[in-house]
Image: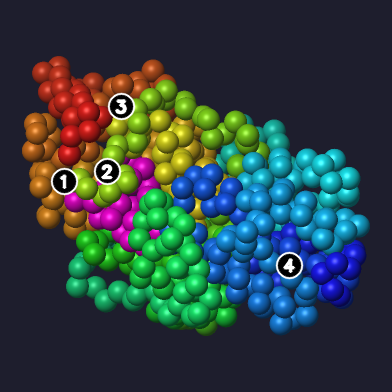
């Protein structure tokens, strides 16, 4: 088919839909339909994404377009630097309709509310039928989650997860969970020792396509956050599967045990580093979970590792997506605790005397990656304790991680990390003093603050901030049964002690928000 010939369906494939199993591609016919893929400025800049994230997606898109062409598809690919590129999905679909005169537009539902709203306007705008298909890459649909949530007072992940285990049959022994328990989290809280052998994620050398993208991103997005190189991500399904197999053989066995650990200079520990591949479509979540189950069945990994990993995917990943679509569009504006301070400057530079945050933010700038406990108990915990506006925190997370798309990032940030939804997603705020960080990491030994001191300018800032946070937010939080014990401890403290803690926190917050280096 030549470019000016009329095609039947125009199939728009988005940058996080890079799978030949995509519902829109399954519906389409390579002999009659045309695939449209477009690198658009609006998507690369609506928040100023990390350079590595932009390069990963554009390179993976270009590789996927080649894969589709080899499989016999006609692909209309618009590069970012194409002089005619209008810079938006709507503009590019309109141009493609002019070129190809399709009878209809087919697209798999996007991962962001903003984009879905835009797509809903296309039928009128282009006077064409626009079919928005269910994304079948997930275990559950948006409608399934809505049905599960309907009429429930609480939407706890654990109960959703059990339903998912039953419906997928993963790690099930008839109608009972394998090993007799649904959740082996209690076995998964071990700190790691620095001398423990730790595998590194599989790295890939950039090919000519990736090098061209790196050059373009370096030129056009120089003002965006983060280091562009070294760039070692997989950008094809074949390589993402190699990274996955490497994780299964090298790291999965210890994934559960050290899931909550943090160590200086060890950016990945036993984490899979597969989220960017899963979320972009290079890896299939269903196939991955089956492989993990098989590894356990073959006695290659213990049950706490297999269950811990599968829970992250069929539990958390599916659950946060359900929450996102259930609660948008207002969800990202939630602010149950009325936090109103701006994001501290060091989130953009990593320059802080707090060793733990310098490590987590430093590796985020380098790799567009931090593991879960760093996101939750370091950058998230600190922002919550300091009283930063949840929307600022949300935009930062959306920007800096290569795996960040609003459907997965927003519930994790707004709900789990910042408690801004008032406890819809988490039963209590994830806050801690320096003690927890000291127990789970080796950061404190090399820190210029003293984790054992509670007040004063040399004390670990997390300590006074923790108590000040509880006191400041007492009205909203004190009825929470899971906070009964810390409130009882606070109430037992002498007033002079409480005063010292509050003054220490106030002094630290003043210096922090005045822009001093803390
Ligand atoms: C504040 C905050 C923001 C986050 N933002 C994102 C985000 O933008 N994108 C994203 O994919 N994850 C996000 N997460 C969840 C989690 O931190 C990342 O999925 C994980 O760190 C990715 O690294 P990994 O692939 O090595 O994960 P592993 O630790 O190896 O976990 C395996 C897989 O489980 C899934 N997973 C684990 N935890 C979660 C979770 N809480 N929610 C959804 N999926 C999960 C991921 O697909 C991950 O690849 C966020 C967590 C927090 C606390
Ligand atoms: S002492 Fe406090 S600020 Fe320093 S690394 Fe430990 S927890 Fe972080």
Confirm or deny contact between disc 2 and disc 4 (CB under 8 A).
Answer: no
Instruction: Check disc 3 and report the residue beneath it.
Output: 470
Instruction: Check disc 1 and report the residue beneath it.
Output: 353
Q: Nearer the viewer, mark 2 or mark 3?
A: 2
Q: Nearer the viewer, mark 3 or mark 1?
A: 1
Gap in Å between the C-alphas at discs 3 and 4?
Answer: 55 Å
| SS class, disc 1 | loop
Please name the residue shown 78% across and 73% down the image.
Answer: 74
Gap in Å between the C-alphas at discs 3 and 1?
Answer: 24 Å
* Disc 1 Cβ-to-ligand 2 distance below 8 Å: yes
Gap in Å between the C-alphas at discs 1 and 2?
Answer: 10 Å
| SS class, disc 3 | helix
How many numbered circles are shown?
4
Report the side of 509 relative to 267 (left or right). left
Gap in Å between the C-alphas at discs 2 and 4?
Answer: 42 Å
Region of the chain picked out in magenta, as a range: 355-382
> Can you see residue 334?
yes
Q: Nearer the viewer, mark 3 or mark 4?
A: 4
The image quarter in which residue 106 lies? bottom right
> Can you see residue 438?
no
Report the side of 28 relative to 382 (left or right). right
| Nearer-the-camera pick, 293 or 410 | 410
Instruction: Check disc 2 and report the residue beneath it.
Output: 346
| Nearer-the-camera pick, 200 or 9 | 9
């Amino acid at each position: 088919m030549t470019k000016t010939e009329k095609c039947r369906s125009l199939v728009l494939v988005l940058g996080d839909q890079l799978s030949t199993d995509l519902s829109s591609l399954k519906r389409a016919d390579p002999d009659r339909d045309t695939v449209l893929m477009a690198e658009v400025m609006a998507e690369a800049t609506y928040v100023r994404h990390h350079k590595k994230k932009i390069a990963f997606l554009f390179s993976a898109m270009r590789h996927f377009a080649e894969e589709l062409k080899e499989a016999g598809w006609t692909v209309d690919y618009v590069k970012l630097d194409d002089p005619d590129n209008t810079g938006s999905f709507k503009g590019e679909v309109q141009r493609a309709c002019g070129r190809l005169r399709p009878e209809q537009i087919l697209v798999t539902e996007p991962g962001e509310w903003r984009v879905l709203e835009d797509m809903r306007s296309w039928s009128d705008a282009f006077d064409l039928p626009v079919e928005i298909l269910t994304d079948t890459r997930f275990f559950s649909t948006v409608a399934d989650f809505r049905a599960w949530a309907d009429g429930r007072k609480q939407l706890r992940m654990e109960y959703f997860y059990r339903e998912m285990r039953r419906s997928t049959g993963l790690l099930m022994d008839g109608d009972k969970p394998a090993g007799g328990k649904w959740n082996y989290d209690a076995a998964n809280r071990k700190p790691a020792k620095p001398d423990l052998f730790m595998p590194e994620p599989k790295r890939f050398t950039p090919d000519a396509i990736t090098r061209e993208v790196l050059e373009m991103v370096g030129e056009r997005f120089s003002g965006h956050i983060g280091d562009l190189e070294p760039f070692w991500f997989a950008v094809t399904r074949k390589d993402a599967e190699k990274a996955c197999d490497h994780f299964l053989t090298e790291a999965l066995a210890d994934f559960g045990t050290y899931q909550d650990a943090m160590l200086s200079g060890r950016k990945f520990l036993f984490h899979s580093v597969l989220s960017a591949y899963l979320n972009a479509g290079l890896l299939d979540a269903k196939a991955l979970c089956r492989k993990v189950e098989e590894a356990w069945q073959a006695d290659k990994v213990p049950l706490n590792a297999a269950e811990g990993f599968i829970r992250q995917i069929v539990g958390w990943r599916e659950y946060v997506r359900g929450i996102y679509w259930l609660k948008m569009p207002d969800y990202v504006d939630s602010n149950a605790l009325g936090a109103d301070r701006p994001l501290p400057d060091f989130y953009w530079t990593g320059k802080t005397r707090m060793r733990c945050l310098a490590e987590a933010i430093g590796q985020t700038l380098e790799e567009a990656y931090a593991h879960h406990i760093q996101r939750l108990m370091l950058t998230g915990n600190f922002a919550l304790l300091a009283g930063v506006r949840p929307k600022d925190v949300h935009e930062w997370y959306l920007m800096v991680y290569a795996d960040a798309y609003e459907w997965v990032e927003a519930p994790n940030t707004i709900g789990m990390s910042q408690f801004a939804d008032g406890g819809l997603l988490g039963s209590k705020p994830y806050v801690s003093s320096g003690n927890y960080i000291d127990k789970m990491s080796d950061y404190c030994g090399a820190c210029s603050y003293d984790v054992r001191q509670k007040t004063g300018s040399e004390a670990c800032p997390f300590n006074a901030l923790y108590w000040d946070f509880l006191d400041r937010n007492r009205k909203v939080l004190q009825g929470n049964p899971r906070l009964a014990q810390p409130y009882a401890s606070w109430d037992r403290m002498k007033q002079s002690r409480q005063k010292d803690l509050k003054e220490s926190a106030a002094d630290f917050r003043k210096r922090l928000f005045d822009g001093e280096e803390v």
